[in-house]
Each structure stands twice: as structure tokens, then as C-alpha cells.
Image (cartoon, grey):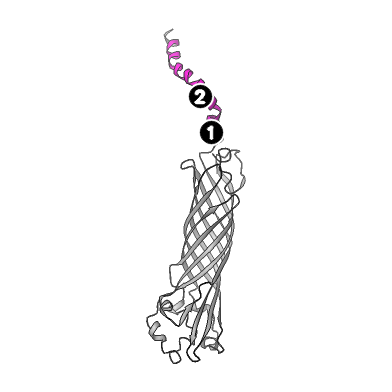
Amino acid sequence: MKKTFCRWFILFPFLLLMPAHAGDVPSLLMARTRHPRMAFTLDISPKAGGGNTFFLNSNVKNDPNAKRYFFCPSYFYGGRAGLTFISSFPNRVFFTLYGEYLFSNFSQKYLMTDYSSNTTYDHEYNVGGISKALVFRTTIFSGYENGGAMYLEVGTQTSTLKKATEKNSANYVDFYTQTPNYRPLSKFNAANNNLIVGLGAHGIVYSIGLRFTYGRAQLMANNVQPVDDGHYNNTVSNPDYLTHYADKKETRLLMVELVFELNLYLLELGNATCGKQRIFPFPMHLNQDAIW
């Protein structure tokens, strides 16, 4: 009798609570059996973009006779692959670490004064190469209902320059084209290390954002100035050259580009709803039934 009384005494509080929470029992069970506490997804994204190039050089900036054109186009295309971590806390933030492989191209154009004829002419570079990057991205969701999200990312990029062309609109043959085996690519460092910072917004299938790429090292080889075309830097025809370029400054690359990404996430690990691999268009309608 005493044992029976003790059992009922222990069970009595739970019996009182059961009616109040009876409707929650299925959802609690679903939360334990269907909604994952964490997951890892394979992030795959074709991407492309374009924007503007800036060769940052204080000597050129302070030279009144050499002016950089503001708009000098750049573009890239390729893709990324990485791993995204999804956790129940915080349940509106994803963390992604991805690698990137891009074919890229940038340009820079200058308007310079030809002292020998007192006229102006254009000098332009067009450079192409391959870029590899390692980037960390944080994606923050505004709510499950609308699936709206924004991302912030930072990373490091290594670019290998493969080709370069050099155009000059003046009606003369400059010094470099007269040099045997001269290649415009020799003006640039073959490998460049850059810093990447990006931010943007996610839609259902794609994302659009801004990317800033800044060169952490000298772009030009051997402190060559970007306006050294073999004529402008001739101190006989241009006596003012040494005034502005006696102390040669480094040239740093800056690109500001609009990025378009087509996002696909392959669910690989984690206690997913169906327990199977699935392909989702990002952001996977981040509601209770799909992810949590």
C-alpha cells in the first residue's frame, strides 16, 4: 500500500501537467525526431561579376599631366565550393567556409600629356589571370517566413596573372615595343595577394552583392610606375617626370565589383527531416518543416 501511494504521489504532478501540454506532445516528438539540432551542407555556387578597377599610386595621383580614367572595367567568372554549418543556436545564422576559383580580367587607362607635341594621348593596360581564394562567410536571416537574408564575408585571394596587353594611342613607336622579346606582362608581378571583403543579399535561388578586392602587395614589378610607357618617362622630352617620380611609389590594386551567385546547397550531414541527401535552392525556405 505504501509503495502504491508513493508511485501515485510521484506521478500525480505529471498527470496534472499532461492535459495542459497534451497538444504539444506531437510537436515535441517531431522536434526530437524530425527537426535537426545541427547540419552541415555542401555549398556549391557558380558565380560571375563585374565592376571597376583602380590602380592606386600616389605619384600618379599627384601628377597633373597623367590622369587615370575613372571607369576601367573588370570582370570575373567561375565558382565556389565550401561547407556551411547550420546550428539550432543561433538559429538564424549560417557559417560558410569556401574555396573559390575564378577567371578574372581587369584594366586601367590613363590620359597623359605628350610633351614633344604638347598633345594628350591614352595609355591602357588589360590584364587577365586566375584567382584562388579562401573566404569565410556569415549569413544572417531576417526571418523564417520570408526567407530574407544578408551575408558578410572576408577572405584572402591569390591571383596569378597570365596575360597582359598594352595600348598606346600616340602616333609613335614607344621604347618597349622596340625592345626584343618585350612582354607587357613583365611590368606586373606574376603573383598577387589580395584581401576580399563582400556583402550582399540572398534571394530564393540567387544572391547579389558587392565585393571589394584590395591588393596587399605591389602590383607592378620592380617599382615600375603604371605611366612608364617608354615615352612619358623619357626625361629628355618630359623634364617634369623626375619631379613627380623621383621617389617611386607602390601601385596597389583595388576593384569594386557586383557579384551574382546561383546558390545550391546539398544536404550532406546532420539529422535532416527525411534523413536523406537533398538539393535545395538557397535559402531552402528556412522554416520549421525544412530545416529545424
| Quadrant where the N terminus is found in the figure | top left
Which dot marks residue 114? none
Q: Amino acid at mark 2?
A: His
Q: Amino acid at mark 1?
A: Ala
Question: Does residue 23 lie above or below 69 as drawn?
Answer: above
Query: Residue 108, can we see it?
Result: yes
The one of 147 and 250 positioned closer to us in this rendering: 147
Question: Does residue 189 lie above or below 237 as drawn?
Answer: above
Q: Residue furthest top?
A: 1
Q: Are the residues flagged by discs 2 and 1 in contact, CB closer than 8 Å?
A: no
The span picked out in magenta is 4-29
**Residue behind mark 2:** 21
Q: Position of residue 112 (x, y in %)?
A: 49, 83
**Residue behind mark 1:** 31
Secondary structure mostly seen in magenta is: helix
Q: Position of residue 201 (x, y in %)?
A: 53, 53
Q: Which residue is drawn at the image coordinates 43% and 17% (left, top)? A: 10
Q: Which residue is drawn at the image coordinates 49% and 65% (left, top)? A: 158
Residue 250 drawn in magenta: no
Query: Residue 104, can we see it?
Result: no
- C-alpha gap between disc 2 and disc 1: 15 Å
Q: Position of residue 240 (x, y in %)?
A: 41, 87
| Quadrant where the C terminus is found in the figure | top right
Q: Secondary structure at mark 2?
A: helix
Q: Secondary structure at mark 1?
A: helix
